Image (spheres, rainbow, N blue to C red):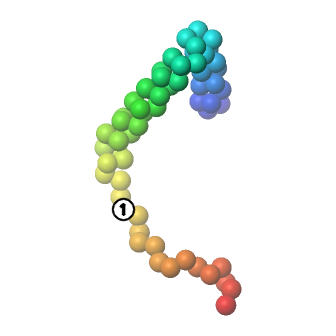
């Protein structure tokens, strides 16, 4: 199912109950909380380095 349908429903409910300005502030705070949590996550902080990329491939063209 995913998170999009419940998130859309919640955002619509929040708009109805709290109004546009308050809804934007609440959703921005939730997004900031998610960004901080992801930044502090050990899995993200200790992610392995990506291999170095070489020059772009010409796609088989001479």
Residue bearing mark 1: 49
Q: Does residue 28 appear anywhere in the picture?
A: yes
User: Which quadrant, please, contains the C terminus?
Assistant: bottom right
- Decide which of 13, 18 is in the foreground and name it: 18
In the image, residue 17 sits, relative to residue 49, either above or below, namely above
Please report the residue visible at 59 percent of the width from the left and 25 percent of the height from the top: 7
Q: Residue furthest right?
A: 61
Asked whether, in this view, residue 41 is left or right of residue 28, the answer is: left
Q: Does residue 10 appear anywhere in the picture?
A: no
Please report the residue visible at 63 percent of the width from the left and 11 percent of the height from the top: 16
In the image, residue 24 sits, relative to residue 57, either above or below, namely above
User: Which quadrant, please, contains the N terminus?
Assistant: top right
Q: Residue furthest top?
A: 17
Q: Position of residue 56 (x, y in %)?
A: 55, 77
Give the quarter of the image for residue 23.
top right
Asked whether, in this view, residue 26 is left or right of residue 5, the answer is: left
Asked whether, in this view, residue 40 is left or right of residue 10, the answer is: left
In the image, residue 60 sits, relative to residue 37, either above or below, namely below
- Decide which of 28, 58 is in the foreground and name it: 28
Q: Position of residue 44 (x, y in %)?
A: 36, 47
Q: Residue furthest bottom?
A: 62
Q: Position of residue 29 (x, y in %)?
A: 43, 26
Please report the residue visible at 35 percent of the width from the left and 41 percent of the height from the top: 39
- Residue at disc 1, secondary structure: loop
Q: Position of residue 55 (x, y in %)?
A: 50, 79
Give the quarter of the image for residue 51.
bottom left
Please report the residue visible at 60 percent of the width from the left and 16 percent of the height from the top: 15
């Amino acid at each position: 199912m995913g998170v999009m349908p419940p998130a859309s429903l919640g955002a619509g409910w929040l708009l109805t109950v709290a109004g546009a300005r308050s809804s934007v502030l609440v959703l921005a705070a939730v997004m900031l909380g998610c960004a901080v949590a992801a930044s502090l996550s050990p899995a993200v902080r200790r992610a392995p380095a990506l291999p170095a990329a070489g020059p772009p491939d010409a796609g088989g063209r001479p």
